Amino acid sequence: MRHALKYTLLSLSLLVADTAIAQVPSALATCIRSANLLACVDAEGNAYSVAAAGSTTYLRGFEVAGKRYWAQTNSRYGQLTFFTGLASDGEAWVGYSQRVGWTTRNRFSSSGGSSGKFTCSRISGC
């Protein structure tokens, strides 16, 4: 999975927003939020949306660099969140995030040959 897409998707998996309309510095993204949908566009034109329904989160987006659309579904079971995704060029990916206190352990792999694991903390980041 391409690095930019990988970190965008994993960051979205951890996303929590409290405001109805959020304006992030132009280097990041501009987002609009409703009750259960968040839609964002960054300075390069990459776009994504996040919709929540119960313990499932749906992500969709467009990646300018690769000129491809993608979709990801996250399903939460207690402290575990499993995710699967598919891009318009045929790449697929799977992974999970496990919350342990203020730390999240993440692991993923894709049909494009990428795989990895990393840990994120609310204090020190990823």
Image (tube, rainbow, N blue to C red):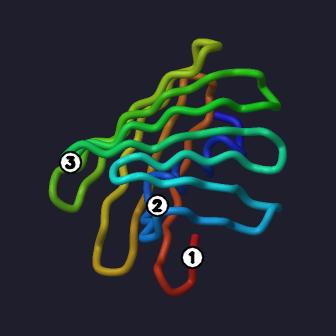
Q: Is residue 38 above or below residue 14?
A: above
Residue at image coords 74%, 49%: 42
**Residue at the disc numbered 3:** 55
- At horizontal 46% and vertical 29% (from top left) the residue drawn is 85
Which quadrant is the N terminus positioned in? Answer: top right
Q: Position of residue 80 (x, y in %)?
A: 25, 55
Comes first in the chain, label 3 or label 2: 2
What kind of residue is marked 2? Leu
Residue at the (58%, 12%) spot, across then down: 90
**119 is higher (above) or lower (below) than 77:** below
Asked which quadrant contains residue 103, the reply is bottom left
Q: Secondary structure at mark 1?
A: loop
Give the residue type that dot 3 points to: Ser
Q: Earlier in the sequence, mark 1 or mark 2?
A: 2
**Residue assigned mark 1:** 125
Label for residue 15? 2
Q: Position of residue 15 (x, y in %)?
A: 46, 61
Mark 1 or mark 2, whichever is nearer to me: 2
Q: Position of residue 35 (x, y in %)?
A: 34, 53
For the residue marked with disc 1, what is the amino acid? Answer: Gly
Q: CA distance from mark 3 to mark 2?
A: 14 Å
Query: 62 left or right of 64?
Result: left
Closer to the eye: label 1 or 3: 3
Q: Residues within 10 Å of mark 3 (few under 14, many from 20)?
A: few
Task: Determine whether, in the image, residue 55 is placed left or right of residue 117.
Answer: left
